[in-house]
Amino acid sequence: MTPHLIALLLASTAAQPAAALPQASPQTQADNAALAATLNWADEQDFEFATRGFLGSIPDGKIRDAKGAVLRDLADEAQFTGPAPATVNPSLWRNATLVAKHGLFQVADGIWQVRGLDLANMTIIRGQSGWIIIDPLTGAESARAAMQLVTEKLGQRPVVAVIYTHSHVDHFGGVLGVVNPADVAAGKVAIFAPEGFMAHAVSENVIAGPAMLRRAVYMFGTSLPHNATGHVSSGLSSLNTPGTYGLIPPTDSITAANSNRVVDGVEIQFQLTPNTEAPSEMNLYLPAWKALCLAENANATMHNLLTPRGAEVRDAKGWADYLVEARRRWGGEADVLFTSHFWPRWGKAHISDYLLRHAQAYAFVHNESVRLMNQGLNAVEIGEAIKLPEPLAKAWFNRPNYGSLKFNARAVYQRYLGAFDGDPASLDPLPRADLAPRLVAQMGGAKKVLSAGKAAAAKGDDRWAATLLSTLVRAAPDTPGAKAALASVYRQLAFRAEAAPWRNFYLTGAQELEQGIRPSQPASAAGIAANLTVSMLLDSMSVRLVPDRAIAPMTIAFEIPDAKERHLVSIGNGVMLHEQGVADAAQATLVVPRRALIGLIGGAVKAPELMAAGQLQMKGDLTVLQRFMGLFQPPKPDFPLVAP
């Protein structure tokens, strides 16, 4: 996750106004009880694994910024214990009680993890002269707090190497809290990452980042209270700690042809797994400890093949195949398996079974979705029909606490066939703003639709109630009681949801229906944005161009002296194109260093300021430059999702 998305990917949850706490309806309670009766409560192995090797946590439980302000108080996690409240799906509550555990844990004699301080885990390996860090958390503040805890419990040692397992910000963004960039530049610290890491880490969400960011507010529940009627878990962890995100480029790229290393006396065998959970990802094995790290390719929950915030669909078959390969290579040898989220697993037999059934679950989602697709079912119908076989479903690590089986099945369909379901009526559907008023009118008007929606909700038929009431809200949002009725329905759906992202989507939708959209609070991500290439910057500009303003042709050149690059931008017929290394003449030219260009395009600095500092020169027809800068429309960061 990169600049546009990380800004919000998980700012802290916010308190909501005091009000009567919502209650679970009789149908919600009955549905949760019915689900609970099917779950494998006799299997309590995860509770032992999640607490094994605990050495202690942050003394006062508070993670602070450089000024001493509290970014997160870990004492909040104490509320997640005991039986599931009526307002939380019992499977998700179990997940919340487990991921609430935080502190430093020993994995093996020479391997430790800091868990629960941030969205992901930080793993610490003892090398000959210092620490090797795997995945330095999301922000510098939480990473710094983790290292202070490590020093307190294990003693002072320098960090000699950092390993990024993959290209999502929660696995590299805290690097500036672990090492000094000057030490990396001086060769004192090595940084390892899978092939293609930098391109994906920086650019994965640049183009559609604003839309992804808006949806991430919903997926991660960033505006919800952290309690039993609000956000209880991210599914992968408890909470992310807000802070400062950064990135130091790798000094060594792991490739398939060159995948083994000895780092500070520690032998490491890598397995590249591209296009699984992340576009650039890798597993690794430590023979000295018989310890296998599976990054985010294996978890204590089903993962997303298509994350609800939006991303490219992941490869379910490839994901399963890489898990099978890891099991074949190391499954019969590993004594301990650890990952970038959740807790480790111990014992050869358990690890082998875990890898097999986890791989089978992803393979099943792929194979069964394709089978049903070829029987003529569309994406929604496949999601409704698909069920994991009982031996897979009873394993807690295959429960949908993060990824959803329904959503994943629909993702497989989308990967192969796209969004169109083959029905001619779906070729040219009416837009929402046109469809909703017609449906409401056809059903007899707003009052009748509201009455029907409330009647469905009273019967516990909340999916149908949501369909009726959301149509009404989109058609006639000022109908008295409509938004409140829909918010109430969304809460009941949330209280049933086994997947944390689904719960957060429903609850955030309810919150915005009642309170309106809260302005997003961007976090500091300048350390990642600084790594954008000029081509990435121009790509981001091209999708902000307003076509009607750009019919007349023009050419602009960007000369980047520090990168020794020249980019030619051509405008015409409502489209912006750009080429690197082209010497064609341009009507106007900007000469500007890359970092200054990032600030200029990002709005952090104005052109006159750069010119006064000698960082910007303009040549050619200045009226063309002025017209060029007026062609673009900034993204709308807080567009509505639940109302027109």
Image (cartoon, helix red, strand yellow):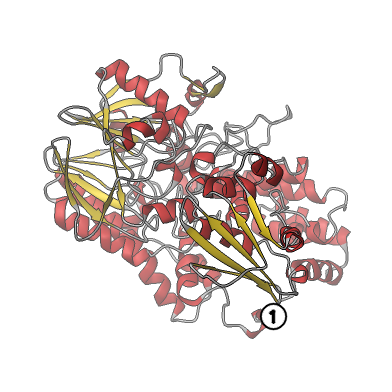
Residue 427, position in %: x, y?
Answer: 65, 81
Answer above or below: position of 169 versus 139: below
Residue at the (44%, 68%) spot, across then down = 412
Considering every residue shown, the one lying at the far front of the view is 620
Q: Nearer the viewer, residue 442 or 278?
A: 278
Q: Badge 1, how many Cα within 10 Å: few under 14, some, many 20+?
A: few
Q: Is residue 201 left or right of residue 625?
A: left
Q: Which residue in the protein does label 1 denote?
A: 428
Q: Which corner quadrant of the image does residue 88 belong to?
A: top right
Give the total number of marks visible in the rendering.
1
Answer above or below: position of 482 versus 467: above
**Is any part of residue 492 visible from this angle?**
no
Q: Amino acid at mark 1?
A: Asp
Residue 254, position in %: x, y?
Answer: 26, 53
Helix, strand or loop at mark 1: loop
Q: Nearer the viewer, residue 57 or 451?
A: 57
Residue 366, position in %: x, y?
Answer: 38, 68
Residue at the (76%, 57%) spot, across then down = 469
**Is any part of residue 121 visible from this angle?**
yes
Residue 641, position in %: x, y?
Answer: 70, 54
Q: Nearer the viewer, residue 502 or 288?
A: 288
Residue at the (36%, 32%) spot, across then down = 182
Q: Is residue 475 left or right of residue 308?
A: right
Quarter holding the C terminus is bottom right
Q: Which corner quadrant of the image does residue 465 belong to?
A: bottom right
